[in-house]
Image (cartoon, rainbow, N blue to C red):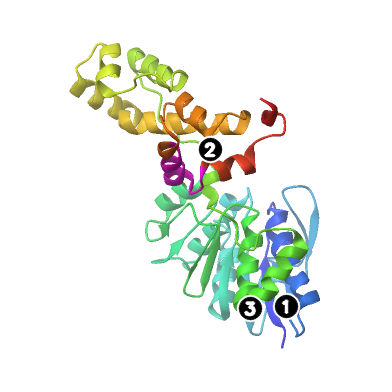
């Protein structure tokens, strides 16, 4: 028996969230010696459904008319997800189909639709790093982890931003048919079977709030512009004309992070820019970013982005920067 995969879409969905997993299942069908997957696309109403990129896809079936056993229910994401959280037909349809599915999954911020349908309560889940904080606030009963490419909690799978739907689908294929088939599918699609690191390596650097007080705004700008300077609390407090205790208290109160944490994030971001835009040695990157030595650079990178500086450079440095 083929495994029935129902992919739920809606107006303004992210096309890659549909196309990526669908191509993984289709490629598995080409390579597998046994019946594989039958993919169906469903929406609140059958018919044409426009994606956010302007391409229209055809939903074969209305959610209310989907009947019979489902192996995998997959809910996509997209920029329009927030407006669909109030769509009772969509949320109710997802909840109904999930109750009869062997497993349930989401791509990107499609996890919000699963949460709204009551499917993530008490579970660990992930979503796109841009909206992970919002998800944690909106659904406090969900343990949100913004770094993993995908998470399985029981029979519910959630994946991170956009392209991670491919990683998720490969993991589902591996679970169904073994790693050999999943590896061959990944080779055919020219993607990683297991992507190195988490999605933190793609996220924007942490930005603290801008302080209200002008002296603290100047200190924040000084830190960002001079990562290799002495940025200890005593030094920064003297520059601000405050006692160390008062400076730490006011800086933390107005930015939301301690001076030490802000300095580390700023230096880590400086190191990341150097790795992306220059061919400097790791020793030089560590010195110029204020991290001192390659060992500290490595430790900070692993802590913030779950990858080594060398791995990060190989993935994100431009050809032009390799000449510098």
Which span is picked out in magenta?
Answer: 297-308
Camera-near label (3 vs 2) is 3
Instruction: Name the spot of residue 207 as percent of width and height, x first.
Output: 45, 32
The image quadrant of residue 203 is top right
Q: Is residue 298 above or below residue 170?
A: above
Q: Is residue 162 above or below residue 29?
A: above
Residue 77: mark: none
At a point 41% along the width and 60% down the height, the residue shown is: 142
**Is residue 254 visible to the viewer in this orientation of the structure?**
yes
Q: Residue beneath label 1, please?
A: 37
The image quadrant of residue 180 is bottom right
Q: Which image quarter is the N terminus in?
A: bottom right
- Asked if disc 3 and disc 2 are in contact, CB closer than 8 Å, the reply is no
Q: Residue beneath label 2, please?
A: 204
Between marks 2 and 1, how big is the CA–CA gap? 37 Å
> Would residue 269 be counted in the magenta stretch?
no
Residue at the far bottom: name it: 1
């Amino acid at each position: 028996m083929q495994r029935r995969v129902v992919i739920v879409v809606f107006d303004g969905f992210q096309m890659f969230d549909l196309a990526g997993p669908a191509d993984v299942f289709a490629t598995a069908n080409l390579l597998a010696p046994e019946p594989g997957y039958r993919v169906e696309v469903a929406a609140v109403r059958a018919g044409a459904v426009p994606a956010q990129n302007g391409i229209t896809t055809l939903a074969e079936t209305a959610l209310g008319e989907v009947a019979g056993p489902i192996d995998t229910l997959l809910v996509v994401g997209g920029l329009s997800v927030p407006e669909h959280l109030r769509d009772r037909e969509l949320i109710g349809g997802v909840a109904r189909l999930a109750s009869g599915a062997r497993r349930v999954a989401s791509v990107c911020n499609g996890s919000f639709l699963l949460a709204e349908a009551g499917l993530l309560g008490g579970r660990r889940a992930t979503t796109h790093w841009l909206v992970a904080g919002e998800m944690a606030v909106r659904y406090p009963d969900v343990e949100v982890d913004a770094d993993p490419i995908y998470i399985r909690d029981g029979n519910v799978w959630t994946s991170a931003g956009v392209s991670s739907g491919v990683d998720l689908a490969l993991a589902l294929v591996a679970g169904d048919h073994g790693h050999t088939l999943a590896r061959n599918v990944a080779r055919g699609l020219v993607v990683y079977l297991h992507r190195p690191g988490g999605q933190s390596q793609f996220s924007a650097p942490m930005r603290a709030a801008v302080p209200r007080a002008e002296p603290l705004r100047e200190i924040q700008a000084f830190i960002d512009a001079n990562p290799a300077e002495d940025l200890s609390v005593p030094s920064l407090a003297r520059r601000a004309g405050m006692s160390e205790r008062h400076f730490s208290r006011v800086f933390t109160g107005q930015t939301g992070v301690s001076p030490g944490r802000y300095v580390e994030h700023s230096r880590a971001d400086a190191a990341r820019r150097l790795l992306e835009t220059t061919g400097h040695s790791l020793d030089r990157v560590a010195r110029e970013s204020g991290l001192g030595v390659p060992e500290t650079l490595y430790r900070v990178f692993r802590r913030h982005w779950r990858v080594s500086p060398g791995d990060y450079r190989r993935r994100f440095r431009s050809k032009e920067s390799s000449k510098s």
